[in-house]
Amino acid sequence: MRGTGLTGILALLLLLASALPLCAETAEEELDVTEIIYEHTGDAYAWHHMPLPVIVRSRSTGWHVFLFSALPCEGFAIGAADTPYAGKVVEETEEGPVRPLDLSITRNVLSLLLSSVLLVVLVLLAARWYRRHDVRKEAPKGIAALLEPVIVMLEDEVFKPAIGRDWQRYSSYLLTAFFFILINNLLGILPIFPGGANLTGNIAVTLVLAMCTFLATNLFGTKHYWKDIFWPEVPVFLKVPLPLMPIIEIVGLFTKPFSLMIRLFANIFAGHAMLIGLLCVIFVTAKMGPAINGSMMFVSVLLGIFMDCLEVLVAFIQAYVFTMLSAVFIGASRQTNH
């Protein structure tokens, strides 16, 4: 029977999209697109309508554990929208709402745990294949065949040229960072569980990743690397009496990981925000008549499909760029005497 394949997929997407105007009729009169974008790209105490465990410590009553769906309970509630604690768990006291120590399993925390477990499983499955087979007689299969070309490409094309003779020392960290970012980027595109969390679009996560590169770069830097920072080979008037070049070099120590943090965060967050914004066009134009709403719905769905495909490419590119720049920064710290 004809009509399968890509044509069938597009027909199904258009059929699903045709029901969106019916949902839009029940929406609020004023649709706050900004609020919707931040709601879907931010952290939350629920994931795909599934309440998550709330773990908080009160200053007076100690630890409390309950599901998010149970709020308000035990003196805790969700902060009002017009307060500094909007959307956060707060404790109701005589002085007003205060923030308790919050160690809840939020959407990003659960996504982080799941993606970490997935990464470990993939690596262990690939390692098990290599333990049981002779690579000189048999080509990799399964997970090993999926991971080996990527690993070989990164080691031969990125790590060896960028770092130099002791590149193996940093290969484990760089490969872990690459696959961790890639897995979370891809999971963030999926609209169903266990996807949908904007983990690499969270600046706290990219900050930790950038800090790992910062530590790997500076804790193991050679003496020549530090000499070029505090006493670079430039004209003396650029070093004394005003240490202009050393100041620039020291500032550069922090701008490099800062650029890693912002680049990954901004690209992933912007992609998710654009995709959600395109879908919101359907609801924004719901009251402009069936002709305008129908045409904009068609354009929105097509652009949404295009953006989703583009996000798959961006997921790999951003993981590659973060790993490549990390290797370059590490390689710069491994320099020897000229």
Image: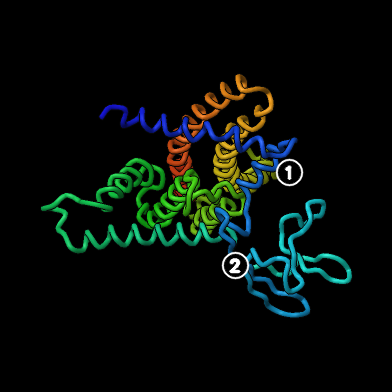
Distance (Cα) linking label 2 and label 1: 56 Å
Of residues 230 and 56, the one nearer the viewer is 56
Q: Position of residue 112 (x, y in %)?
A: 51, 58
Residue at the right extreme of this rendering: 95
Quadrant in which residue 240 is drawn? top right
Is residue 207 rendered to the left or right of residue 32?
left
Q: Position of residue 214 (x, y in %)?
A: 55, 53
Residue at the (72%, 63%) spot, across then down = 89
Quadrant, the C terminus: top left
Q: Position of residue 39 (x, y in %)?
A: 65, 47
Q: Amino acid at mark 2?
A: Pro
Of residues 337 and 96, the one nearer the viewer is 96
Q: Position of residue 132 (x, y in %)?
A: 18, 63
What residue is pinned by disc 1? 242
Q: Residues within 10 Å of mark 1 (few under 14, many from 20)?
A: few
Q: Image height check: is 145 above or below 28?
A: below
Of residues 47 and 137, the one nearer the viewer is 47
Sequence-first disc among 2 and 1: 2
Quadrant, the N terminus: top left
Of residues 104 and 319, the one nearer the viewer is 104
What residue is pinned by disc 2? 53
Q: Amino acid at mark 1?
A: Leu
- Is any atom of residue 337 visible in this view? no
- Say how many tags the image has: 2
Say which element carries label 1: loop
Say which element carries label 2: strand
Residue at the (70%, 42%) spot, across then down = 35
Residue at the (46%, 48%) spot, across then down = 187
- Is any atom of residue 9 visible in this view? yes
Residue at the left extreme of this rendering: 137
